[in-house]
Amino acid sequence: MRFSGLAIVAAVATLGACGGEKPASDAASSATPAAGAAVAAMPATGKTHEIKMIGDEKGFRFEPANLTISVGDAIKFVTVSGNPHNVAFSSVPAESKAQLQANLPEAMGDMMGKMLAGPTDTYTVSFAGVKAGKYEYNCTPHLANNMKGVITVQ
C-alpha cells in the first residue's frame, strides 16, 4: 500500500512538470502585458501645462478646472492656497487606466496622487501613453467643496 501511494504522488508530480513550456504561437502574445500586469511610467514628450490648486474666500478650485491637452503632454499641479490638496482621477478611459496609474509619481492609491501640504508644492502627471478621451479629476480633501475638473486629451 505504501509503495502505490508514493507511486501516485510521483506520477502527479511528473505530470505537473510536463507541459510547462508555452507553444511557439503563445510567445508573441506574452509580450503584451496581461490585465493587472505592471506598466512602466512614461515621461512626457510634449508641453507641460499648469493648473493651480486654490482654496480661498471664493472657494476651493482648480484654475483652470477644464483643460484640453495632447497625448504626451504633462500637467503640473501647483498649490497656491487652502492646503492640503491632491489629484485623484475619478473617471478614466478603461484602456488608459493602467498607464495613467503608472504615470502618477508617488501614488497614494488607485488613481490618486500624493498629498501636497506646502504652499508651493507641485505634482506633475504625464499623459504619455494614454488614449484620447476625458479624464475627470478632483481634490480628495475638498471634493465636498466641489473641487473638480476635466482634462480632455486629444
Image: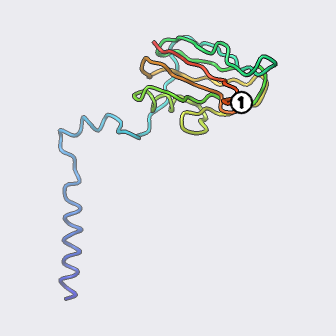
Question: Number of labelled discs?
Answer: 1
Q: Mark 1 points at which residue?
A: 116
Rendering quarter of residue 126: top right
In the rendered image, the residue lying farthest to the bottom is 1
- The front one of 133 and 17 is 133
Other residues around mark 1 within 10 Å, as few (<14) / some (14–19) / many (≥20): some
In the rendered image, the residue lying farthest to the right is 57
- Residue drawn at the location 18% of the way across and 71% of the way down: 11
Rendering quarter of residue 8: bottom left
The x and y percentages for residue 4 are 17, 83
Element type where label 1 sits in the image:
loop
Position of residue 47 relative to residue 138, above or below, is above
Rendering quarter of residue 27: top left
- Residue drawn at the location 58% of the way across and 25% of the way down: 137
For residue 80, side relative to residue 140 (left or right)? right
- Image quarter hosting the C terminus: top left
- The front one of 54 and 108 is 54
For residue 84, side relative to residue 40 (left or right)? right
Question: Hey, what amino acid is under mark 1?
Answer: Leu
- Image quarter hosting the N terminus: bottom left
- The front one of 154 and 145 is 145
For residue 152, side relative to residue 64 (left or right)? left
Position of residue 109 relative to residue 100, above or below, is below
- Colour scheme of the picture: rainbow
The x and y percentages for residue 24 are 18, 40
- Residue drawn at the location 65% of the way across and 32% of the way down: 140
For residue 83, side relative to residue 104 (left or right)? right
The x and y percentages for residue 68 are 53, 11
The x and y percentages for residue 90 are 54, 30
